[in-house]
Amino acid sequence: MTDWLLLLILLLLAIAVGWYLGRRERKRSHYYEMGLRHLLNDEPDQAVATLVTELDFEKDSIDTHLALGGLLRRRGELEKAVFVHENVLGRARLDQATRHMVEIELARDYLQAGLLDRAEAMSMRLAAENPEYRSESLKVALQVYEQERDWHKAKEIAQQVSGGIEEAGIEQAISHYCCELAELAIAEKNSVDAKAHLTEAIGHDANNSRVSLLQGQLAINENDPESAVRHLERILVQDPIYVSESLLPLRTAYEALENMAGFRGYLEKCLDRSPSIAVVLALGKVISDQEGADALARFIGNQMQANPSLRGFIELIDVNLIDAEGRIAQDLMLLKQFAEAMISDSAAYRCGECGFEGKRMRWHCPSCRHWASIKPMLGQEGD
Ligand SMILES: [Zn+2]
């Protein structure tokens, strides 16, 4: 073959390859464009179908698939997110690093979709296979065990998560896992185990007010009101916002000690620190028992001027109802019903992390999954 013929063949081949690659590129851009258009038109079904079934799995398109899957998960389109990620794993030939990148996303999809067994299996395997994803995978597994309320396993896994900047959050979570176990032990009247769990909880977070609450409850169950007072009053130093949660057992303890003066002194100290209506009402009850209805009316009236609240307002109506008769009593009753209806519609607790609101105290936010982020609301509506 002469040189010029060889050159001509090579030239034709180059043109053919260029044409083929160009055509393929145009086809890919067309599908990208179509997929994007579907996404922008809020047509996720069509977007998934176009992007997932028509695109070849190459390095850059896998990034597109991961972005699409993540987007779908954030939008709550979990079935489609799972489909996208499973499709990549099933159809593409991936190196190990890329496969792990897809698997951690799929484990998160499973978790969010409530497919806990699959999320657990995938995250635990990934944690064992790839040190780079170990921490992230264990966090997925941790959420699985939290949702299953398997506190022993949650504790075991949390202790393996490398802390870093989240160290304090993980320690706090472990402390609450121990509290959950303590609550179960208290319910089973196993105070030995409950105390052991609470001691461990302190080791992970010395300022956990929940531990003090549970220790107080345990001491009352064991007819040890003196210890109960010591544990429950520690909350004022740990986190005054939770004092309202301790007032009922604390009153029980002081009653057992026949020391209502001591209870009154403590409540006055609390009131100096935090304008909680729960404290005002508890103190009002002690004042009423000790000095009568007039003293209570003066006390509540003064407190309402400084920090108005609906619950205080209802208390004030109750005090005035004692001596009211006829039309005035009827009007006061009407006012009370109105105020109670307003309270029944409003939340008493709010999560400082995500804004979730509820009527009862929870230590674990059901929305953002933070521990001890839900606190009693100090204000007109809830408190
Ligand atoms: Zn939250």
Image (spheres, rainbow, N blue to C red):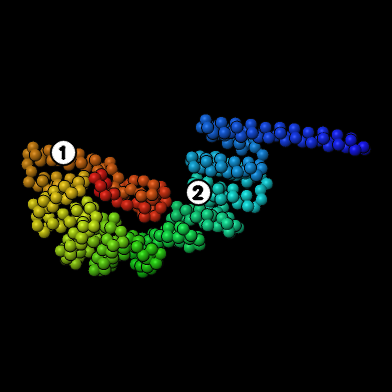
Compared with 22, 309 (above or below) is: below
Viewed as shown, does residue 181 lie left or right of 47?
A: left
Residue at screen point 32% across, 60% down: 209
Depth order, front residue of 189/172: 172
Image x and y of residue 118, in percent: 54, 50
Relative image position of residue 204 (x, y in whole percent): 40, 64
Of pointers 2 and 1, the one earlier in the residue sequence: 2
SS under mark 2:
helix
Which disc is residue 52 wearing? none
Q: Residues within 10 Å of mark 2 (few under 14, many from 20)?
A: many
The residue identified by callout 2 is 111
Q: Residue at x 35, y 51 (%)?
A: 374
Query: Crowding near pointer 1: few (<14 within 10 Å), some, many (20+)?
Result: few
Please tell me in which quadrant of the rendered image residue 284 appears. bottom left
Residue 380 at least partly seen: yes
Residue 264 falls in image quadrant: bottom left
Residue that badge 1 annotates: 334
Question: What is the x, y in percent for residue 263?
Answer: 19, 62
Residue at the (25%, 60%) spot, across then down: 249
Q: Is residue 298 above or below residue 84?
A: below
| Residue at 21% over, 42% down | 340
